[in-house]
Amino acid sequence: MTNTFTKNLLAWFGKNHRPMPWKGEKNPYLIWLSEIILQQTRVAQGLPYFERFKAAYPTITDLANAPEDEVLKLWEGLGYYSRARNLHFTAKDIRDNYEGIFPTKYEDILKLKGVGTYTAAAIASFAYDLPYAVLDGNVFRVLSRYFGIKEPIDTTNGKKKFTKLSQELLAKKRPAEYNQAIMDFGATQCVPANPKCKICPLVKSCVAQKEDLINQLPIKSKKLKKRSRFFHYLIISYGNQVWIRKRTEKDIWQGLYEFPLLETEKLLERKKLESHKKYQQIIPSEAVITRFSNPFTQQLTHQKINALFVEISLENTLNEPLEGWINIVRDDLKTYAFPRIIDLYLQDKSLYLNF
C-alpha cells in the first residue's frame, strides 16, 4: 500500500505542479526564509513578504546585519511576530557561529532557533536532498484520511505514529519531490473542507472515503482555549508630537511599538476611563480627550483583542513620562512597526481582523 501511495502521489505531482518562487530552490537561506514566512500563513499572503525580504536581504549576512526594528517593520502585517524575531536571531547565529554559511546537516539545522522538525526536514530535503520527510498540517490530513488513522495528531503517540509512517512513505531517492508533492496535495486536493475526492487519484485506496470519515479526520484531542483582552491605547499628543513605547514583555507583539496602554477587565466608557486610577497617574488633569474611538477587534490564535483608541491633547509636554516611553513626531509613526490593530486605527479603517 505504501509503495502505491508514493507512486500515485508522485504521478499526481508530475501533472499538477504549482509554480512558486521558492520551488526548486537549492539555496538553504531562501528555503528557510520561505518556510518561516509560510508558518501560520497562506501562500497568497506570504508570497509578497518573501519577495520583499529576498530583495532587502539577498544573503543571510544581510539579514543578520539589519536592525531588529527594520526587520519587524518589513514583517509588519504578517502576524506571529516571534517568527520575525527568531528569523533575525538565527541569521545572526549563523553569521557568528557558522561563518555565515547555512548548516548542511539535519541535526545542526534542527538546533537553530525557530526551526522545528518540519522546517528542518523541509530545508534538509529541498536544499541538500537528504531523506527526511516533512510532517505539517497538510501531511497529517492526507495521511490520516488515506490510511484511516484515528490517533489524535496532537498527542505524543499520534505524532510518533505519523512520523514513522511519513518516513516509511518517503521516496528516499526523491525526497524533495516527494515532500513538495504531499504538501501540495494537501493544499490543493485533499483540503480541509470539501476535498476533491471525485478527481482524486488516491480515492480507490482511501480509507476515509470508504468509511465516510472525510469530515472526521484528522482528529485532535485538545480544544484551543481562547481568552479576551481589553486594551485602551492612549494617544497622548503635545503639538505634533506623540508618545509611543516598545513592547518588551514576553507577550503578544513583543518587539513592536504601541501607544501607552491601559489594560482592563473590560472596555471602559469615557467617564470610567478618566476616573481610573492608572489613567489619572499617567494623564495630567488639564489634559483633554479629543477623540474616543469605537471598539477595534483583532482575533489572534489564542486570544481576542478588543481595543479603544483615546486621543488626548496636552497643554504642556509631560515632564516625567513613564520608563520606556519615547516622544516622536506624529508623521514619523509610519517608520515604526506596530501591531495590525494599531495600523488599522491609524488608517482609520474599522475592520474585524483574522490571521
Image: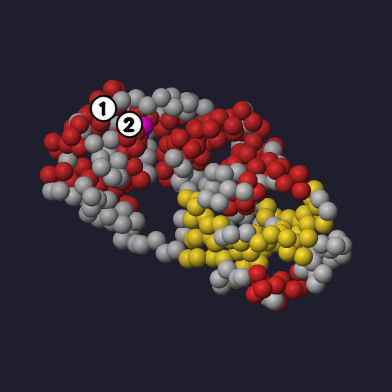
Q: Nearer the viewer, residue 329 or 196?
A: 329
Tell me the quadrant of the picture where the N terminus can be found. Answer: top left
**Magenta stretch bounds:** 178-182
Residue at the location (80% across, 48% down)?
329
* x then y, percent, for residue 29: 55, 32
**Residue sitting at x 56%, y 57%:** 296
322 is higher (above) or lower (below) than 142:
below
Q: Secondary structure at mark 1?
A: helix
Which is more N-terminal, label 1 or label 2?
Answer: 1
Residue 61 has which mark?
Answer: none
Image marks 2 and 1: residues in contact by CB distance under 8 Å: yes
Residue at 59% across, 32% down: 52
Q: Disc 2 residue type?
A: Ala
Residue on which disc 1 sits: 12
Image spot of residue 285 (x, y percent): 80, 72
Q: Name the quadrant containing residue 247.
A: bottom right
Name the residue type under label 1: Trp
Whether residue 5 appears in magenta in the rendering, the answer is no
Total of numbered circles in the picture?
2
Q: Is residue 81 visible?
A: no
**Residue bearing mark 2:** 181
14 versus 348 height, above or below: above
Q: Could you say where residue 164 lies in the image, as x and y percent from the top left?
A: 29, 46
Q: Nearer the viewer, residue 34 or 101?
A: 34
Q: Nearer the viewer, residue 180 or 123?
A: 180
Q: In this rendered view, identify the residue nearer to me: 9 or 98.
A: 9
